[in-house]
Image (tube, rainbow, N blue to C red):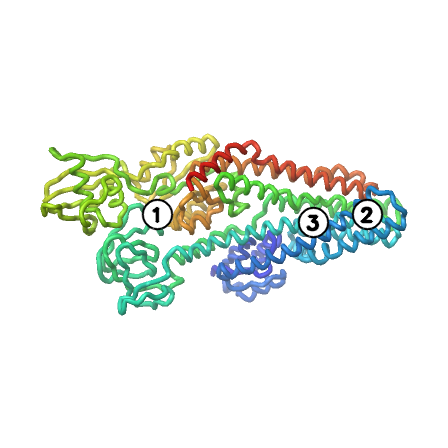
């Protein structure tokens, strides 16, 4: 059995990883993926070996609660409350911490009488108490949990450093010494609170992807029995619903009367409409193009195809499991290393004959002095800086972990319609019958296509303009009478081997010629494809469209791998099947599962809300021409983040010999932590400096486009 659950109380990636291992260790569990950004657990298990009670018990033993998966808006509300709580704790930490650090600076640099210095040190400690034991209480608890789950990380590292600094300082005060480390404890907690607030905002953003699916289909339906408009959720199974021409269906069902053309692009990405008649199925979100249909509902609201697609997105997000970013990897190594060094320092002191108290103080000094404050913000600061740089490029980064994965992507998969092409048919050629002019051919076609909501009709009207009182849309054709009463017929589009569509136009049965249409390539597509290949990426295309137009686009752009006729789930499976980190870019609801399944999903400007909110990176202004600079920014961000991690621990490593010998004084530790923090900030500000002018130019262009 496979189910998606919610996990109450999950607050850090390390805890998610530990819980993932705990669940995977249960008998009969085939798959366990815990995703902390959405606080969800995807579990596949054999009920004969393990029941739900055993799963819930294992989660409860870890300190959390397993519940039925919540609706996105419920979890979003919980995260909003968590963000408000973190903001309050951060405010307290900043205010109280500033006073604690200010008093510590007086101790470091002012020459004071021992009695005066002791009282100032005590004041620094009093201000540190609410920071560590109230604002940082959650980190202390999560640090303890990470030990129980066997996955120590940033929370344990900061907790150990802060508690070590507090204990060392209290011991000093009890001895009458003013040499204290309270400012170290407050700085550790404050910086981690800032980093956690950034992560919480990211988690909230991730959930909007699921909510967007609820808005992809209209929520009202017209009952055939009495023509009442009711909420789609209130329509029972077996009821009959009217879907007029030009309207999107809000229910899934079977056509019981009427014949029409239906655009299913919202679900499949097919650029050409399909014919439906009595007995055919139609899904919510599909647009009825030509004539009234009556549908008998065969799926309940919540179980529609588009609802299942929303469930697929939730599963794809959860399938990613617990992420382990660069800062989490480093903190995991450091917490083990620093704790071992502290214990070794105590053992060395005892071996050298020092008193037990002195050896413990030496170990606490090393623990407090070597805990790198800057590590908590080394990567979050880069993420914020990258988000700012991206915003100036007209790009919104929704999922920061995925943006980091983009730097390592070696394959990128494109949707076709609307991403590489304009998504709107355009007349590219006219093939005339003898004695017929272009004006005569276009006028006849325009008369038949006027007043019809259809992509082909829009292409004809865009070229000629409306003519007459309006034509009639039939099964794969349009027709009308001209001013002389002659019958005009425009035949249904037929794909040619080169991927183009052809309209056969006749008048009273006599051929006037053919109109050739194609979904034109975006002018920037070829350049972008070349730049991405030059950057070392392998290009693929996955589309719900037919093989002929897909291969035509691929040949024009030099894309070797083409996957035509893909369903939304097929696109998602393709993302999982390709080796290595895979990026996907698309614009439709049918692309949403693939966007969620990819290592980094990107949407272009004008994309459907579901695609835009599911995408990890949303291009707000522009199209695929933004891809090369986005990739360059991701790679530069990764490089800066790695440098920050080195800088965050480098100064502490310099102080290691003094710490090991028990010579590390608070002034040196404070100087090392301040220097590492300032270095991390300064290095982060380098990100985007070389692109400043181009970014301004892009921003100006975006303003003009708006």
Marking on residue 696: none
Q: CA distance from mark 1 to mark 2?
A: 66 Å
Label 2: how many residues lie within 10 Å, few (<14), some (14-19) or many (20+)?
A: many
Residue that carries the numbered disc 1 in the rendered image: 269
Q: Is residue 702 visible?
A: yes
The kind of secondary structure element at disc 1 is: loop
**Which quadrant holds residue 312?**
bottom left
Residue that carries the numbered disc 2 in the rendered image: 346
The kind of secondary structure element at disc 2 is: helix
What x and y, as percent, mark residue 365? Answer: 80, 46
What x and y, as percent, mark residue 182? Answer: 77, 50
Against 338, residue 628 (above or below) is above
Residue beneath the point at 86% across and 45% down: 351
Q: Earlier in the sequence, mark 1 or mark 2?
A: 1
Label 3: how many residues lie within 10 Å, few (<14), some (14-19) or many (20+)?
A: many
Contact (CB < 8 A) between labels 1 and 2?
A: no
Q: CA distance from mark 3 to mark 2?
A: 18 Å
Residue that carries the numbered disc 3 in the rendered image: 157
């Amino acid at each position: 059995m496979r189910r998606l659950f919610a996990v109450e109380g999950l607050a850090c990636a390390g805890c998610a990883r530990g819980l993932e291992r705990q669940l995977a260790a249960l008998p009969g569990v085939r798959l366990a993926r815990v995703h902390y950004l959405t606080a969800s657990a995807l579990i596949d298990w054999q009920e004969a070996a393990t029941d739900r009670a055993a799963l819930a018990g294992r989660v409860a033993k870890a300190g959390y609660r397993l519940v039925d998966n919540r609706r996105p808006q419920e979890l979003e509300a919980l995260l909003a409350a968590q963000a408000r709580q973190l903001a309050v704790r951060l405010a307290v930490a900043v205010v109280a911490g500033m006073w604690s650090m200010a008093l510590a600076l007086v101790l470091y640099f002012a020459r004071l009488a021992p009695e005066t210095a002791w009282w100032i040190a005590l004041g620094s400690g009093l201000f540190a108490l609410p920071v560590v034991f109230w604002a940082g209480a959650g980190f202390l608890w999560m640090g303890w949990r990470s030990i129980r789950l066997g996955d120590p990380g940033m929370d344990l590292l900061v907790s150990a450093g802060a508690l070590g600094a507090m204990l060392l300082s209290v011991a000093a005060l009890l001895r009458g010494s003013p040499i204290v480390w309270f400012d170290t404890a407050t700085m550790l907690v404050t910086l981690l609170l800032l980093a956690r607030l950034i992560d919480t905002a990211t988690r909230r953003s991730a959930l909007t992807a699921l909510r967007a699916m609820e808005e992809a289909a209209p929520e009202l339906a017209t009952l055939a029995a009495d023509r009442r408009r009711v909420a789609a959720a209130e329509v029972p199974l077996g009821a009959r619903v009217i879907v007029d021409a030009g309207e999107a269906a809000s229910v899934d069902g079977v056509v019981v009367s009427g014949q029409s053309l239906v655009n299913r692009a919202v679900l499949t990405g097919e650029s050409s409409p399909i014919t439906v008649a009595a007995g055919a199925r139609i899904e919510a979100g599909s647009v009825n193009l030509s004539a009234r249909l009556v549908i008998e509902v065969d799926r309940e609201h919540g179980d529609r195809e588009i609802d299942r697609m929303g469930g697929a997105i939730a599963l794809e997000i959860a399938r990613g499991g617990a992420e382990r970013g660069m800062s989490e990897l480093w903190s995991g190594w450091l917490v083990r290393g620093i704790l071992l060094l502290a214990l070794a320092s105590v053992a060395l002191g005892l071996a050298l004959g020092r008193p037990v108290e002195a050896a413990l103080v030496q170990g606490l000094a090393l623990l407090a002095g070597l805990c790198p404050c800057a590590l908590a913000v080394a990567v979050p600061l880069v993420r914020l800086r990258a988000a700012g740089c991206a915003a100036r490029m007209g790009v919104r980064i929704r999922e920061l972990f995925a943006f980091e994965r983009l730097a390592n992507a070696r394959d990128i998969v494109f949707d076709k319609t609307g991403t590489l092409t304009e998504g709107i048919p355009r007349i590219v050629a006219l093939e005339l019958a003898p004695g017929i002019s272009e004006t005569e051919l276009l006028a006849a076609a325009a008369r038949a296509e006027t007043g019809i909501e259809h992509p082909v009709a829009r292409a004809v009207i865009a070229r000629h303009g409306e003519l007459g009182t309006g034509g009639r849309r039939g099964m794969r054709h349009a027709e009308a009478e001209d001013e002389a009463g002659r019958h005009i017929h425009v035949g249904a589009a037929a794909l040619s081997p080169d991927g183009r569509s052809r309209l056969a136009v006749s008048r009273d049965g006599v051929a006037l010629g053919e109109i050739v249409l194609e979904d034109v390539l975006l002018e920037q597509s070829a350049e972008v494809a070349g730049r991405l290949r030059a950057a070392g990426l392998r290009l693929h295309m996955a589309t719900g469209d037919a093989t002929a137009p897909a291969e035509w686009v691929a040949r024009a752009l030099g894309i070797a791998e083409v996957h035509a006729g893909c369903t939304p789930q097929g696109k998602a499976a393709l993302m999982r099947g390709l080796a290595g980190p895979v990026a996907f870019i698309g614009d439709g609801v049918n692309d949403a599962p693939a966007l969620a399944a990819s290592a980094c999903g990107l949407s272009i400007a004008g994309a459907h809300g579901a695609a835009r909110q599911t995408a990890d990176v949303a291009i707000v202004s522009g199209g695929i021409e933004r891809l090369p600079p986005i990739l360059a920014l991701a790679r530069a961000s990764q490089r800066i983040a790695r440098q920050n991690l080195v800088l965050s621990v480098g100064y502490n490593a310099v102080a290691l010999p003094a710490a090991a010998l028990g010579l590390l004084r608070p002034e040196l530790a404070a100087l090392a932590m301040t220097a590492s923090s300032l270095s991390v900030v300064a290095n982060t500000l380098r990100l985007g400096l070389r692109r400043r002018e181009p970014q301004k130019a892009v921003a100006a262009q975006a303003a003009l486009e708006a």
